[in-house]
Image (cartoon, rainbow, N blue to C red):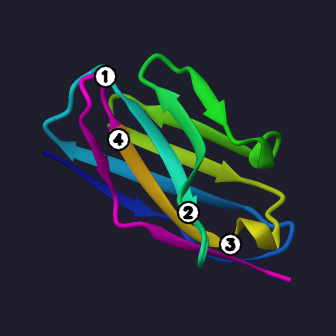
Amino acid sequence: QVQLVESGGGLVQVGGSLRLSCAASGIISSINTMGWYRQAPGKQRDLVASITNGGSTKYADSVKGRFTISRDNAKNAVYLQMNSLKPEDTAIYYCRWSNPYGMYYWGKGTLVTVSS
């Protein structure tokens, strides 16, 4: 089983930056995708960005040019650098790990609040 622990959330003003981190532990296959999802109150959980073990990335249109996802395979960690934050970025951000065999795990989430 994979355990995911997120960190780095908090309160930031409009236009500010935050860096989220997610560390994975447990039984981890080398072929996997790690990603960040977010869920605002009353809304569904949506993909923000994801990255494969080979470095291929995917971003939601709403964060392109502002957010950057990266990973350290040696540390089994994924990061999300968030710049130019907007109030609509306010949400709980969840880390997700998945592999091609249908296995996936979620972290408990970290709250990001962007104040205007």
Q: How far apart, in angstroms, are the residues tagged by discs 1 and 3?
A: 30 Å
Residue 106 shown in magenta: yes
Q: Which residue is mark 3?
A: 90
Closer to viewer: mark 2 or mark 3 = 2
For residue 100, which numbered disc appears in the image? Answer: 1
Image quarter where the N terminus lies is top left
Q: Which residue is mark 4?
A: 97
User: Do the residues under discs 1 and 4 have CB atoms within 8 angstroms?
Assistant: no
Circle 4 SS class: strand
Query: Disc 2 or 3, which lies upstream in sequence?
Result: 2
Does 31 sit above or below residue 61?
Answer: above
> Taking 54 as reference, is 29 left or right?
left
- Residue 114 sits in which quadrant? bottom right
Q: How far apart, in angstroms, are the residues tagged by discs 1 and 2?
A: 24 Å
Q: Which residue is mark 2?
A: 44
Q: Identify the residue at the far top of this view.
A: 54
Query: Disc 1 or 2, which lies upstream in sequence?
Result: 2
Residue 94 shown in magenta: no
Amino acid marked by disc 2 = Gln
Circle 1 SS class: loop
Q: Residue at x 80, y 67 (%)?
A: 16
Closer to viewer: mark 1 or mark 3 = 1
Does 73 sit above or below residue 59?
Answer: above
Graded by Cα atoms within 10 Å as few (under 14), some (14 to 19) or many (20 or more), the crowding at tag 1 reads few
Query: Disc 3 or 4, which lies upstream in sequence?
Result: 3
